[in-house]
Image: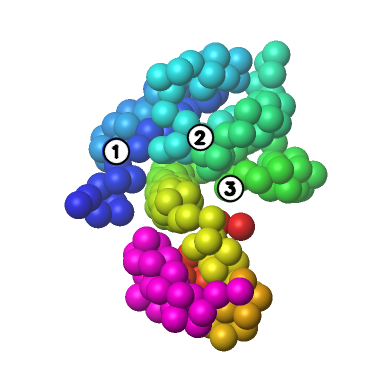
Amino acid sequence: MQNTQSRQFNATVHVVDDDDAVLDSVGLLLTTIGINNYSYSNAQKFLDAYCHPDFDKHSGCILMDIRMPVMSGIECQYRLEELGCTLPIIFVTGHGDVPTAVETMKNGAFDLIQKPYREQVLIDAIQKALSQNTSAQSHNKKINNTKERLATLTNRETQILDAILDGKANKVIAIELSLSQRTVEIHRARVMEKMAVKSLAELVKIVLDTL
């Protein structure tokens, strides 16, 4: 199994900037430290790439200039939000005024870096964004796994699970569903087995995480 750092380095940083010199320098920096990266000379080119079926929409992050001709980084951020993009966005700007920073952060930007910046500041921000992305992917994978397990429950097992989540004891569940307490216990054991949990607390936690 790969560790977190190796998974981060298998991710891709998408660099969006209208300055070719910036694209070249950032691309070289990331390549030097072993981080996959792609460059885009404007926001529309990135959006076109993002909408392509082969684009990995889950692993990586976006490093994007705020002020670009035709389409600004902020406008691109809104477009990406409409497309359901979950990749962390780091904005880079030479015009890091407070209103701009507030707008980007309110809209979900991961970070905002003002030019000129030290290379280490940029690297640290990117690695933090990739770390967050890796954690989010892991969390989503667990949720999807739980949903798949929930789908294997029978209607009766789902009824039992719902009652368990309401904090009802086996005796109460039995009365409400017109079952024997032993039958409820059997169904409850099957629910625990199918959900691959060993305790009631664990069962409640993983199910509530999907809501």
Q: Residue furthest right?
A: 99
Q: In terms of image quadrants, where is residue 32?
A: top left
Label drawn at residue 181 = none
Q: Residues within 10 Å of mark 3 (few under 14, many from 20)?
A: some
Q: Residues within 10 Å of mark 2 (few under 14, many from 20)?
A: many
Looking at the picture, which amino acid does disc 1 mark?
Asn
Pointer 1 residue = 10
- Is disc 1 in contact with disc 3, using a CB cutoff of under 8 Å? no
Give the main secondary structure of the magenta stretch.
helix
The vertical placement of 100 against 195, above or below, is above
The vertical placement of 160 against 110, above or below, is below
Q: Residues within 10 Å of mark 1 (few under 14, many from 20)?
A: some
Task: Provide the residue span drawn in magenta.
Answer: 178-199
Front residue of 69 and 165 = 165
Residue 123 % position (x, y): 40, 46
Pointer 2 residue = 62
Looking at the picture, which amino acid does disc 2 mark?
Ile
Front residue of 69 and 109 = 109
Residue drawn at x 25%, y 47% as measured from the top left: 6
Residue drawn at x 46%, y 75% as measured from the top left: 183
> Label 3's element?
strand
Residue 27 appears anywhere in the view: yes
Residue 156 % position (x, y): 53, 61
Label drawn at residue 111 = 3
Between the residue at mark 1 and the residue at mark 3, the CA separation in whole angstroms equals 21 Å
- Is disc 3 in contact with disc 2, using a CB cutoff of under 8 Å? no
Between the residue at mark 1 and the residue at mark 2, the CA separation in whole angstroms equals 15 Å
Looking at the picture, which amino acid does disc 3 mark?
Asp
Residue drawn at x 55%, y 40% as measured from the top left: 86
Sequence-first disc among 1 and 3: 1
Residue 42 appears anywhere in the view: no
